[in-house]
Amino acid sequence: MHRTKVTIVEEALDANNTIARANRDDFDRAGVRVVNLMSAPGAGKTTLLEATLVALHGVRAGVLEGDVQGSLDADRIAHLHVPVVQLNTGSGFGGECHLDANMVRSALPALPLEELDLLIVENVGNLVCPAEFRIGEDARVMISSVTEGEDKPLKYPLMFRACELVVVNKIDLLAHLDYDLELFLHHLDTVHPGVPRMLVSAKTGEGVEGFAAWLREIAAREAVPA
Amino acid sequence: MHELSVASAIVDTAVRHADGRPVSVVSVRVGALRQVVPDSLSFYFEIVARDGLCEGARLELVAVALALRCRECETEWEPEFPEFRCPGCDGASVEIMTGEELEVDYIEVEEEAACIAQR
């Protein structure tokens, strides 16, 4: 026997990226822009989504819900009469902790893409894994709530870098917490200098219009090659 | 837990390039910015590799440091911690030179001596 070295030099996640590009091509053909919402569990993604969908006047939006288990989130969105598909990742080793391009691809036939301007994908709540997997989206939004503490950008730099917008949620609780918003923004600026940020409360509605306007602007964009 | 997906992707890539030959080593470059837990990745690699060309192969993980470059003043630095603001000019426009890799660099495969002789 003889050992031979074979040089490869290939991104391990190339296969995912290839499928993500195929998703993006399909989205472009259908004229739908896609936003990937990521956060820790309990940051308020679904509540923010509920508040925002109501404020998205004139934009035909659809939602893809990613969860390990169940359809609780999709049921909430369905009440708003918005097309919604639930994607469960709970097969194999106790359930995948993120959506990948292939999972999103499997859900596309269930969505009326041609009738949508904007597809919002609510990723599985997790501060690590979703950042590693592109799904064919136009933009990624990271939602961080003030109950999570100021140190999260320093602990999960990849997630806070893998986004085009950071939304700070639950600001209605600021008065009741020791949370130092300035310190959080300083940490955010350390790992992702200059990233656009918004302060919102999905509960009181403060700042929600700003987020809706940001999404409207994405929805109105022309397709740009991925 | 995404180490399972990453391990599968690594095994798939290695098998694709092995051309039917048994794989003994898979070398992967892992950048400092990738949140991959080495022990977890090795654990899943062994499981995913079973019953295929990578069965029993050694997974070699090579750490790649984070190296940044300021687009404004061209300062280059290797931060210990992900500090992305330029220490030279405080600029925010920073290019990542290394540290984002999750790259199957090479594999080593076993060849029959006879195959070599035929070449």
Image: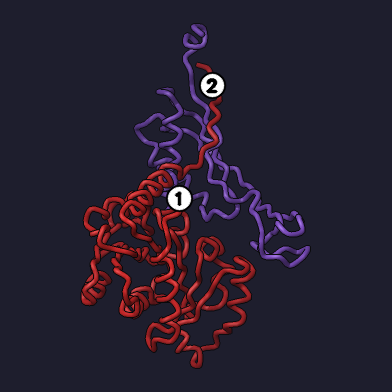
| Residue A73 pos. (x, y %) | 27, 71
Helix, strand or loop at label 1? It is loop
Name the kind of residue labelled 2 in the image.
Arg
- In this figure, which colouring scheme has been used for the structure? by chain
Name the kind of residue labelled 1 in the image.
Pro
| Residue B77 pos. (x, y %) | 74, 55
Where is A25 relative to B118, above or below? below
**Residue A31: quadrant of the picture:** bottom left
Chain in purple on the image: B
Q: Which residue is mark 1?
A: A225
Query: Which color has been applied to chain A in this rendered view?
Result: red
Query: As drawn, which residue projects farthest toward the top?
Result: B118
Helix, strand or loop at label 2? It is strand
| Residue B93 pos. (x, y %) | 66, 61
Q: Is residue A99 left or right of residue A165?
A: left
Q: Residue under mark 1: which chain is it in?
A: A
Category of crowding for the residue at label 1, using alpha-carbon neighbours closer than 10 angstroms: few (below 14), some (14–19), many (at least 20):
few
Please name which of the two marks, 1 or 2, marks the residue nearer to the observer.
Answer: 1
Q: Nearer the viewer, residue A143 or A116?
A: A116
Q: Which residue is mark 2?
A: A3
**Residue B95: quadrant of the picture:** bottom right
